Amino acid sequence: MNWNKFFTAFIAAFIFLFIFGFLWYGTLMRGAHEEVQALFRTKPDFPWLILGHVVMAFFFAMLCVRFVPAGGIGASAALGILVGLVYAGAHLISFAVEPLTTKILWGWIAGSVIQFAIAGALVGGIYKPRPPMTS
Amino acid sequence: MKRFILAFIAAYVFLFFWGWLLNGVVLKDVYAETPNLWRSQSEMMSLFHWIIVGQALIVFAFVMIYASGFAGGGVAAGIRLGILLEIAAIGMRMGFYAVQPFPGKLIVYGSISGLIEMIIVGAIVGAIYKPTSERTP
C-alpha cells in the first residue's frame, strides 16, 4: 500500500466530509433541525464531532483503497454511493424510531449519498498504488 | 445472481433478528431512560415498514460492495469488509452523539453490537456469495 498517497487521500476526505457536513447538515438543514429542537443539543460537542469525522474518513479511505487498489475516480465514487446507501438505510431506521420529520429524513439520505460519492471520487483521484520497484 | 439473492436473504434474516434482540430486548431499559428522544411504541409500529426497508437497504448495499470488490476472498474478506464499514459507522455514531443528546452508553453498546453484527453479516455474505469464475460446473 502507498501510505503517503493514502494519508493525503485520508486528509482530503476528512476536510471534505467536515466542510460538507457543516454546509449541508449545519447550514442548509438548520431550519429543519430547529423544527425538532428537543432531539438536538443546543451546541454541538465539537471534540466528538471532529473525532467522529476523523474515524469515518480514515476507514472510508481504507475501504476505498481495499475496494479499488489501483485507485480511480469512477469506481471509488461508485463505492461512495453504496456506502451512502448503507447510511441511508440507518437513517430510515432512525426515522422509524425517533420523532424526526420527513424533511430531515430525505435531507439526511440525500446528504449521505452525495457526501460519500464525492468523498469516494476524491480518495480515488488522489490514491495511486506504489509503482513496482525496478531492479 | 442466485448466490447474491441467497446471501442477501441470509444476511437480512440475521440482521432483522439481531436488531430485534438487541434494540427490542437487551437495550430496552437504556432506551427507556430517554423517552423524549424516541417515538411511542404505537408510532414505531405504524412506521415499522421503514425499519424493514432500512435494514434491506443496508444489507443490499453490503452485498453489492462485497460482490463488486471483495468477492473471491470468502469469509475472511466478508469479515474485513464488515469491520471497515462498521468502524466508519462508529465514526458516524460519534458525530450523532456530538449533536444529539443520546446517552453515552447507548453509543458504546450500539458500537460494540454493531461491530459484532457486521462481522457476522460479513461472514454470512462471504460464505454464501461466490463470483461466477470460482464456482465449479
Image: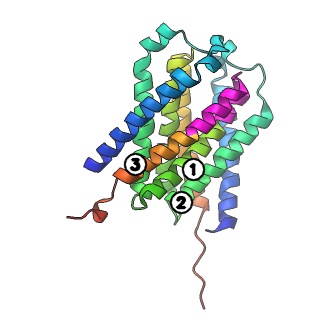
Q: Are marks 1 and 3 in contact (CB under 8 Å)?
A: no
Q: Is residue B134 left or right of residue A88?
A: left
Is residue B53 rendered magenta in the image?
no
Magenta-colored span: B93-114
Residue at (67, 22) in percent of width and height? A30
Q: Which mark is residue A66?
A: 2
Q: Which mark is residue B84?
A: 1
The residue carrying mark 3 is B125
Q: CA distance from mark 1 to mark 3?
A: 15 Å
Q: Is residue B87 visible?
A: yes
Q: CA distance from mark 2 to mark 3?
A: 17 Å
Looking at the picture, do discs 1 and 2 lie on one chain?
no
Q: Nearer the viewer, mark 1 or mark 3?
A: 3
SS label for mark 1? helix
Q: Which mark is residue B129?
A: none
SS label for mark 2? helix
Which residue is farthest left?
A: B137
